Amino acid sequence: MTTNEEQDLNSGEAVRQKILVADDEASIRRILETRLKMVGYDVVVAEDGEEALELFNKTNPDLVVLDVMMPKMDGYGVTREIRRTSDIPIIILTALGDVSERITGLELGADDYVIKPFSPKELEARVKAVLRRSGVKDVVIPAAGGKVAKNVITTGCIKIDTARRQVYRKNERIRLTGMEFSLLELLVNNSGQAFSRNEILQHVWSYPADHRIDTRVVDVHISRLRSKLEADPANPELILTARGIGYMFQRIN
């Protein structure tokens, strides 16, 4: 337990989660800082990528909101540097028409994206959902038939500890982001059941059923999971594509 956590427990105060917002537009920084503070978060702001990295290392935030186009270092570079050492949740802010920005950010390790222009309320919802799914506490998802999966699941050489939200291959830990683990957990706890991309977005990202979003966010996360878990990601044996539906997990004895 860190000193800050001990102080929070001793004082009896609830721990306030900290959000780092990085955007080169002062108006966006002001709006997001004000709105996120109003709903109970501590907020630190940066106006360029280099300052974002400096504040990330100095303040240890719980989540980062990154604009893609920033001076000194863009959002891609910041995401890449953060992912070298941390699995902290990252939400990227992207331009309305540029699909490539979203895909690139997700491939580098971002957990979700919000399209500019956006409403602060929408971003608040995405922050809340990503933090909830990326937390260290176990998220129990009913398995097929209504049964709850055991804390440790072994399939082939892969061991999945749902209590600690950790994954191992032959006793070597595989680093997953919080959203990657939640996606894996959904599929593993419902092994053999195919989920559509929209169903996955509802279960893991907490998007409402009628919310329009590019479902490639799921494809990118599946690709990332396969690259970390599969012996041959091009010919997966664990996370399978269910033709005409979406994805499913297949256990290996």
Image (tube, rainbow, N blue to C red):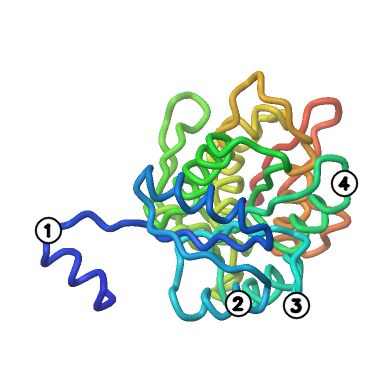
Instruction: Indicate which label's residue lies in the foreground, 4 or 1.
Output: 4
245 lies above or below 59: above
| Position of residue 174 measured from the top left corner of the image (x, y, whole percent) | 60, 69
In the rendered image, which residue does mark 4 sit on? 98
* Quarter residue 193 falls in: top right
* Nearest to N terminus: mark 3 or mark 1: 1
Q: Amino acid at mark 2?
A: Glu
* Quarter residue 249 falls in: top right
195 lies above or below 93: above
Give the side of residue 235 with respect to residue 212, left or right.
Answer: right
Indicate the secondary structure of the residue bearing disc 3. Answer: loop
* Nearest to N terminus: mark 4 or mark 3: 3
* Nearest to N terminus: mark 2 or mark 1: 1
Indicate the secondary structure of the residue bearing disc 2. Answer: helix
Q: Are marks 3 and 1 in contact (CB under 8 Å)?
A: no
| Position of residue 131 measured from the top left corner of the image (x, y, whole percent) | 47, 50
- Which residue lies most toward the top here? 210
Residue in the image at 77% along x and 50% along y = 220
In the rendered image, which residue does mark 3 sit on? 72
How far apart are the two marked residues, 2 and 1, measured between alpha carbons?
33 Å
Q: Nearer the viewer, residue 35 or 93?
A: 35
Instruction: Indicate which label's residue lies in the foreground, 4 or 3.
Output: 3
Mark 1 Cα-neighbour bin, 10 Å: few <14, some 14–19, many ≥20: few
